[in-house]
Amino acid sequence: MDACNALIVDDEADIRELIEMTLLLLGVTCYPAENLGEAHLLLKRRPFAFCITDLRLPDGSGLELVAHIQKHHPNLPVAVITAHGNMESAVEALKLGAFDFVSKPFELTVLRNMVTTALRLNHGEIHPDANRPVLLGHSAAMESVRQMIAKLARSQAPILISGESGTGKELAARLIHLSGPRTDKPFVPVNCGAIPEHLMESEFFGYKKGSFTGATQDKAGLFQTAQGGTLFLDEVADLPIPMQVKLLRAIQERAVRPVGGRVEVATDVRILSATHKNLAALVQQGVFRQDLFYRLNVIDLRLPSLREHPQDIPELVEAILERLSRQSGLPSPKLAPTALEALVTYAFPGNIRELENILERAFTLCENGLIQAGELLLPAESKSGQPSPAPPPQATEPTPEPPAPPHGEFEPRTAPILQPPSGNLEGYLEEIERTAILRALESTRYNKTAAAEKLGISFRALRYRLKKLGLD
């Protein structure tokens, strides 16, 4: 079958024979070529499902073949064979459009995994899930992102997804995974800034029983959990330098050594990473390793801020309100024209995540199924995204301590509202809301109708917030 033909380009006969014997077990018929000239002739004579080429050939470079295939046979996955440790050439090949690479001397398991993954691209084995997430928006900026995702899904090259907070970097990573040949394998997201530094090695690489106090059994790490699939490193800029060194080795060697283990374990994962920080600037500052930066940033996918495509806001608003309606079991409200205009002209420093928070709040406050502009509670911010100047400070009298409640009256047990902790505004706002609702419930002895009146919201809105906060 033509679909099971592979083109093998290498001037060393023993390498060609080794590859041919390995792929024969996969039902693949290999057509060997010793140089670029023979490879071009074979490409003209028959279609191939896969191509693997050495970088050093007698009459040129394998990079030339990669570029030729990308131009004339864009649906043909091509992998390159590189000398051990020659990551620069491998990265260059990936940037030119190579599907993947394998280093000499290569492990046969790595070769088989790579070819199996590549063959699935053109064998119709990728079945899109009807329930998969959708990248909304039909602006030119979002259409460009969609096209880029479709292209990147056919490669195994590491991708750095950049963009401001709230632009949907994890969603883009999921779509790349779901659109590629690893779609039926795990997608494992990890927030690099949320793992304590002393636990990072064991979390990423796993550990063996007895390797430290409390290690009562073997535990697989994130690399092993993502075996065959995709490992998404969110906020990768937050990795400490020692972990950056170990991560670089794991990516380059395609193997990890669990804590307390004596041998390395081969891994087959695709690495996607994301950050809202400028990694190039962090490299210049010496807080992010340059070699890891070049290894992760083979291809850059930038997600635009919401300010760059405000024409997509109406579509986003409709989708978010429909989702909130499904989750709450309540009818989906409409947006008043003045409210929609206010959203379109707002700068959205928090991007789509901020839009979701604004609409979720308005969803609970609206009455009669219509969200008015005042119910959006937008910050006083100009269209350019700069906050309005604050009024000059006024001299104020010290706030007196509230008097103690008379004997026998109900005394609330909830904690006072605290100052916001840095880096967790959403959690802080939830805690404010939770505290206010609990106080109202306690002061009305858990009469929900009276608590809603005390809070100045409808009973429907209170019921929704109780469900959302897990207080019902």
Image (cartoon, helix red, strand yellow):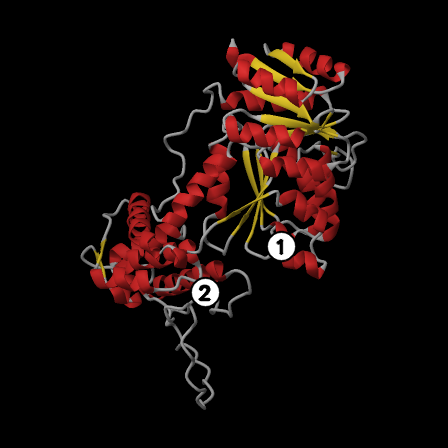
- Residue 10 placement, left or right of 128: right
Q: Quadrant of residue 136?
A: top left
- Residue 311 placement, left or right of 226: left
| Above or below 401: residue 54 | above
- Residue 124 placement, left or right of 95: left
Q: Residue 414 carries which label?
A: 2
| C-alpha span from label 1 to label 2 | 43 Å
Indicate the position of residue 261 as horizontal and vertical percent values.
78, 32
The residue most toward the right is 262
Mark 1 — residue? 279
Front residue of 372/140: it is 140
Indicate the position of residue 461 as horizontal and vertical percent values.
28, 57
Q: Quadrant of residue 96?
A: top right
Indicate the position of residue 326 as horizontal and vertical percent values.
30, 43
Residue at point 57%, 20% (across, down): 50
| Above or below 38: residue 231 | below
Q: Tell me the amino acid under the disc marked 1.
A: Leu
Look at the numbered disc 2 and give the secondary structure of its residue.
loop
Residue at point 24%, 49% (across, down): 332
Look at the numbered disc 1 and give the secondary structure of its residue.
helix
For disc 1, the neighbor class at 10 Å (few under 14, some 14 to 19, many from 20) is many
| Above or below 214: residue 45 | above
Front residue of 55/120: it is 55
Q: Are marks 1 and 2 in contact (CB under 8 Å)?
A: no
Q: Tell me the amino acid under the disc marked 2.
A: Thr
Indicate the position of residue 101 as horizontal and vertical percent values.
66, 30
Which label's residue is closer to the chain start, 1 or 2? Answer: 1
For disc 2, the neighbor class at 10 Å (few under 14, some 14 to 19, many from 20) is few
Residue at point 74%, 39% (across, down): 249
Q: How many labels does the image show?
A: 2
Q: Quadrant of residue 438?
A: bottom left
